[in-house]
């Protein structure tokens, strides 16, 4: 499901769309990236039990509805510990319940979600690979238009490309990439572009005029700026 909100970037308001993913069956679900509209998310969940809310990053547009969604069924909230400082920008008086680690596992219905550390946009960014569904939930790490950004920038591009090449592009080519923003794509669709990204195509100056439409990179909120050394 998609939620939409407005963020302020350098004094200008922009619309940002976020994907929230609900994985489960008729009885129980896990919610991935409860962005900002708990009521809408819980409406989609319906009477099913929420087992966990997993945040692929600690950024506000990934965690904004996490507490409210989790609290309905006393579910746990999971986040990588390196993104806890970002979490506190939104939730200043609480912490997530679970510190995710690389190769951690979540189970729901008849499928398994494997945690893959994919830092870059945030220090504790993770992706969740579900072999049973042939899909990987990549947060901001990788989107249909390439590596995700934050506020139009790559906070730690070298780390991000290492995550993409060393983890995400080792998955089968038919694996569906289900990101926090934008449309669906497959590993096989994007992998041929990797060498161009490494050679600098992502940071070449773009002379095209900016698009005033909704942002798809889940850009910064509340003035958050990340650098490679932030933890």
Image (cartoon, helix red, strand yellow):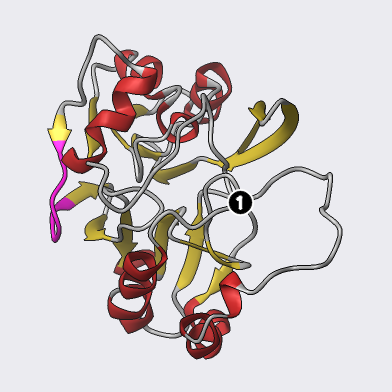
| Residue 26, picture quadrant | top left
Residue at 34% x, 13% y: name it.
72
**x and y percentages locating residue 23 in the rendered image:** 40, 46
Identify the main secondary structure in magenta: loop
Residue 94, placed above or below residue 115: above
For label 1, the residue is 152
Give coordinates of residue 219: x percent, y percent. Answer: 57, 41
The front one of 27 and 141 is 141
Pick the front one: 106 or 187: 187
Residue shown at the point (49%, 22%) measured from the top left: 42
Tell me the crowding category of disc 1: few under 14, some 14 to 19, or many 20 or more residues within 10 angstroms, Cα based: some
Q: Is residue 1 above or below residue 127?
A: above
How many numbered marks, from 0 up? 1
Q: Is residue 31 visible?
A: yes
Is residue 80 toward the left or the right of residue 201 in the image?
left
User: What residue span does the magenta drawing correspond to?
Assistant: 99-105
Residue at x 22% of width, y 14% of height: 94
Q: Residue at x 45, y 85 (%)?
A: 173
Decide whether residue 159 is among the magenta residues.
Answer: no
- SS at mark 1 in the image: loop
């Amino acid at each position: 499901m998609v939620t939409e909100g407005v963020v302020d970037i350098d004094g200008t308001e922009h619309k940002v769309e976020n994907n929230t993913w609900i994985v489960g069956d008729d009885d129980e679900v896990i919610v991935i990236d409860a962005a900002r509209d708990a009521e809408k998310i819980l409406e989609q969940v319906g009477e099913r039990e929420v087992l966990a809310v997993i945040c692929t990053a600690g950024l506000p547009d990934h965690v904004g509805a996490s507490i409210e969604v989790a609290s309905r069924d006393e579910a746990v909230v999971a986040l990588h510990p390196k993104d806890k400082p970002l979490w506190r920008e939104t939730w200043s008086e609480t912490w997530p319940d679970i510190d995710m680690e690389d190769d951690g596992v979540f189970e729901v219905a008849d499928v398994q979600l494997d945690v893959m550390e994919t830092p870059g946009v945030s220090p504790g960014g993770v992706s969740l690979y579900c072999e049973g569904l042939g899909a990987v939930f990549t947060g901001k790490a990788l989107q249909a238009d390439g590596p995700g950004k934050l506020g139009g920038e790559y906070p730690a591009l070298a780390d991000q490309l290492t995550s993409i090449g060393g983890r995400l592009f080792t998955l089968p080519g038919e694996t569906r990439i289900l990101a926090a923003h934008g449309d669906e794509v497959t590993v096989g669709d994007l992998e041929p572009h990797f060498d161009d990204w490494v050679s600098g195509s992502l940071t070449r100056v773009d002379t095209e005029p900016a698009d005033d439409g909704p942002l798809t990179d889940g850009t910064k909120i509340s003035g958050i700026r990340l650098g490679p050394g932030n933890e």
